[in-house]
């Protein structure tokens, strides 16, 4: 009977091994499955005299071939790879958008300035002027189109975050359920291999969405997000939610809902697709939108300012080519009140004072009391100073913009996000529709009065150039000064008799009244800095309200050469309608290379094309780095998966060999039973 029992135990063990091997083969393609092995032990031996004889084998365990370190490595590399893939999936189309000549800004800018040069060559040609207006429209449309695509990308990220948060919650709930089932089976002495595999695979899937931190505790798995915020604790699940960001409601943030409280974890979420999207949004998308907006602001500001300094085909001072960058709508859009502000807290009006000094940063305003607030430059948190809204406080000017609190009652803790350039590319529009309103001519021209003597000359580059800038942000005052210049011209510069090292001159108004005087050095280039006091149509002085109240003036420079004879004169007059002068158009064309962007950084600044090129280069380098990171994490993930599969994965060749082995064991055990039967039969027959 002992021999029979030994054979039966061998049959049972071999059958279990065959079943386990068959289960491995059947699950060769099951995600997260860890191959299993049977573990056999010997039954208790029996003593016969002075010796012990074995009684067979027993199935001790069906072991799951698993290494927690390799599995944790796979989860980490999965999170890193998903982060890189999500980042690359967003930055690649942005790189294509900015760098492609058909969709980027560079081509539209180049074409616009080419049209300016064309008008400069033919200032009176209406067709050339109309083409310039069309290209200006194309330029503003290109800004709008690019901005809309960046806005759409932000909306897409919002939608993806909401969907991914829902997936995270479902997977977290599955982990909690598996925790409970595994605990129940483990407490009863069982080993739920398949449930353990299912739980690990669920955690791996969770790692594709976020960088989950896994801690094993008493057979359960706890999962933490960010810097240690609990998502799963045993069989308890907290909920990941997407909500409008407190600082910027146009962007969704993430919060962990723990039932009795919520915590914002947007800034500390890393890893997985969620981490990749948040990283892309904060380090690439937002700066790109701000940089594109800054270029749009400088384009509109500089071109409108030059338009105000020139004379159009009708003989009037130029009007805006693009819409005003400080319209009431845009001033209000640049400040966003936080969602948690006190009731009636009001908001800030943000006015662009100097577009050249604008940065691509956002800013945080935080009230420390009902009237005092601080300003920080984001994302570094650099302090820009402390200010007050209480009278007689004035609006502070920070990095080219001013802050004016527009009413309301703020309380300590209220905060506002200032985005000076964010929406500018969306808002820029071509306002001018009449090509005759293009101010290509300079407002003042000088000519040597007939009848003079000597060698007085004025080069084309020495013609009068306004040094007084008409403030396009104050149209009423600009109009007063422009009209005043019309009323105050022509003027005349009359030279005295030559003698000695210098020669005097006087500037007279149209009635011969003395306005100012000075001197030149004969036979040299001399720059005359002249100032014209302004009068209204009745001849009365136009006063600056002050204080102190003084007469308004307009200043200009001009260059003369040679040695004028006594009583030689220069007539300086306002450009007339239809003039073919293109000096203001030349200044417009010069904006293509003039350093008008980032002039407040302590450097000389950069040009419009260089600023956009900097944006393209920056995004391009991040896209290239994203490709390298993605390739690297692909390799890391493949290595981690290979290491895990080499231990826990099913090898069909190995399992096929095991099938043959266990079949032979089964056959051999059958022979033991057959031998026992034959012995028993022989014994019976002998009796």
Image (spheres, rainbow, N blue to C red):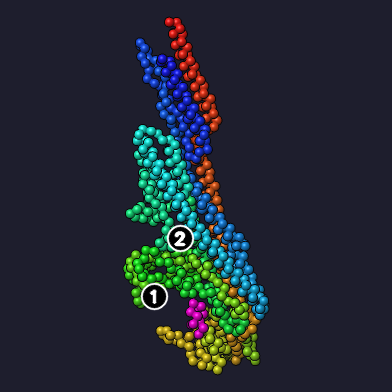
**Most foreground residue, 672 or 32:** 672
**Most foreground residue, 475 or 411:** 411
Which numbered disc, 2 or 1, marks the residue that appears first in the sequence? 2
- Classify 10 Å Cα crowding around label 1: few (below 14), some (14-19), many (20 and above): some
- Classify 10 Å Cα crowding around label 2: few (below 14), some (14-19), many (20 and above): some
Is residue 582 shown in magenta?
Answer: no
SS of the residue under disc 2? loop
**Residue 128, position in %: x, y?**
66, 75
**Res 498 seen here:** no
Are the two marked residues, 2 and 1, in contact with CB atoms closer than 8 angstroms? no
Classify 48 as above or below 19. Answer: above
The residue carrying mark 2 is 251
Q: How many marks?
A: 2
SS of the residue under disc 1? loop
**Res 106 seen here:** yes
Q: Nearer the viewer, mark 2 or mark 1?
A: 2
Q: Quadrant of the C terminus?
A: top left
Q: What residue is rendered at 47% in x and 25% in y?
A: 15
**Residue 314, position in %: x, y?**
61, 84
Is residue 478 shown in magenta?
Answer: yes
Classify 602 as above or below 529. Answer: above
Give the magenta range: 470-480
Classify 519 as above or below 23. Answer: below
The residue carrying mark 1 is 394
**Residue 79, position in %: x, y?**
47, 47
Q: What residue is rendered at 41% in x and 15% in y?
A: 2
- Report the side of 414 relative to 201 (left or right): left
Q: What residue is rendered at 62% in x and 72% in y?
A: 134
Q: What residue is rendered at 40% in x and 27% in y?
A: 60
């Amino acid at each position: 009977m002992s021999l029979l029992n030994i054979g039966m135990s061998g049959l049972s063990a071999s059958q279990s091994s065959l079943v386990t091997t068959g289960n491995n083969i059947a699950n060769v393609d099951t995600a997260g499955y860890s191959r299993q092995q049977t573990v056999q032990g010997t039954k208790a031996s029996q003593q016969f005299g002075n010796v012990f004889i074995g009684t067979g084998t027993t199935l001790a365990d069906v072991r799951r071939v698993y290494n927690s370190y390799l599995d944790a490595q796979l989860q980490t590399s999965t999170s890193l790879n998903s982060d890189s893939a999500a980042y690359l999936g967003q930055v690649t189309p942005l790189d294509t958008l900015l760098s492609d000549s058909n969709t980027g800004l560079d081509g539209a800018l180049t074409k616009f300035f080419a049209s300016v040069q064309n008008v400069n060559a033919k200032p009176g040609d209406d067709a050339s002027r109309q083409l310039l207006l069309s290209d200006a429209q194309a330029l503003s449309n290109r800004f709008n189109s690019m901005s809309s695509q960046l806005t759409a990308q932000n909306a897409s990220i919002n939608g993806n975050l909401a969907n991914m948060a829902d997936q995270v919650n479902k997977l977290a709930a599955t982990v909690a359920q598996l925790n409970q089932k595994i605990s129940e089976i483990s407490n009863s002495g069982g080993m739920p291999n398949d449930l353990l595999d299912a739980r690990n695979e669920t955690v791996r899937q969770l790692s594709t969405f976020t960088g989950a931190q896994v801690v094993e505790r008493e057979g359960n798995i706890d999962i933490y997000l960010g810097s240690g915020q609990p998502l799963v604790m045993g069989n308890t699940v907290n909920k990941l939610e997407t909500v409008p960001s407190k600082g910027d409601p146009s962007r969704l943030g993430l919060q962990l809902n723990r039932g009795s409280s919520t915590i914002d974890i947007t800034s500390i979420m890393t890893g997985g697709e969620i981490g990749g999207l948040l990283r892309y949004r904060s380090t690439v998308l937002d700066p790109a939108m701000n940089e594109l907006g800054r270029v749009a602001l400088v384009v509109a500001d500089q071109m409108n300012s030059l338009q105000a300094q020139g004379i159009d085909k009708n003989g009037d001072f130029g009007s805006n080519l693009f819409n005003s960058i400080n319209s009431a709508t845009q001033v209000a859009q640049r400040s966003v009140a936080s969602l948690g502000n006190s009731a009636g807290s009001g908001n800030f009006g943000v006015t662009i004072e100097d577009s050249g000094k604008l940065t691509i940063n956002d800013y945080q305003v935080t009230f420390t009391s009902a009237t005092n607030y601080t300003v920080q430059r984001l994302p570094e948190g650099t302090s820009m100073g402390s200010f007050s809204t209480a009278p007689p406080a004035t609006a502070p000017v920070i990095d080219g913009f001013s802050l004016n609190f527009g009413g309301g009652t703020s309380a300590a803790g209220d905060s506002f996000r200032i985005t000076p350039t964010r929406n500018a590319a969306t808002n820029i529009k071509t306002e001018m529709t009449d090509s005759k309103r293009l101010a290509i001519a300079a407002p003042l021209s000088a000519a040597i009065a007939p009848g003079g003597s000597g060698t007085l000359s004025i080069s084309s580059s020495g013609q009068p150039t306004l040094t007084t800038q008409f403030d396009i942000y104050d149209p009423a005052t600009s109009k007063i000064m422009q009209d005043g210049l019309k009323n105050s011209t022509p003027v005349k510069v009359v030279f005295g008799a030559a003698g000695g090292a210098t020669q005097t001159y006087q500037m007279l108004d149209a009635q011969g009244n003395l306005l100012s005087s000075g001197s030149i050095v004969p036979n040299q280039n001399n720059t005359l800095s002249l100032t014209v006091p302004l009068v209204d149509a009745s001849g009365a002085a136009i006063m600056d309200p002050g204080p102190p109240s003084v007469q308004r003036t307009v200043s200009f420079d001009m260059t003369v050469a040679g040695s004028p004879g006594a009583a030689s004169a220069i007539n300086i007059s306002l450009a007339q309608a239809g003039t073919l002068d293109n000096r203001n158009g030349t200044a417009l064309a010069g904006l293509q290379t003039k350093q008008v962007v980032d002039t407040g950084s302590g450097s000389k600044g950069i040009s419009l094309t260089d600023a956009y090129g900097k944006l393209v280069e920056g995004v391009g380098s991040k896209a290239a780095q994203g490709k390298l990171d993605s390739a690297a994490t692909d390799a890391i993930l493949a290595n981690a998966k290979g290491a895990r599969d080499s231990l826990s994965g099913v090898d069909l060749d190995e399992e096929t060999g095991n099938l043959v082995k266990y079949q032979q064991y089964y056959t051999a055990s059958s022979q033991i039973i057959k031998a026992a039967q034959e012995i028993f039969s022989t014994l019976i027959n002998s009796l």
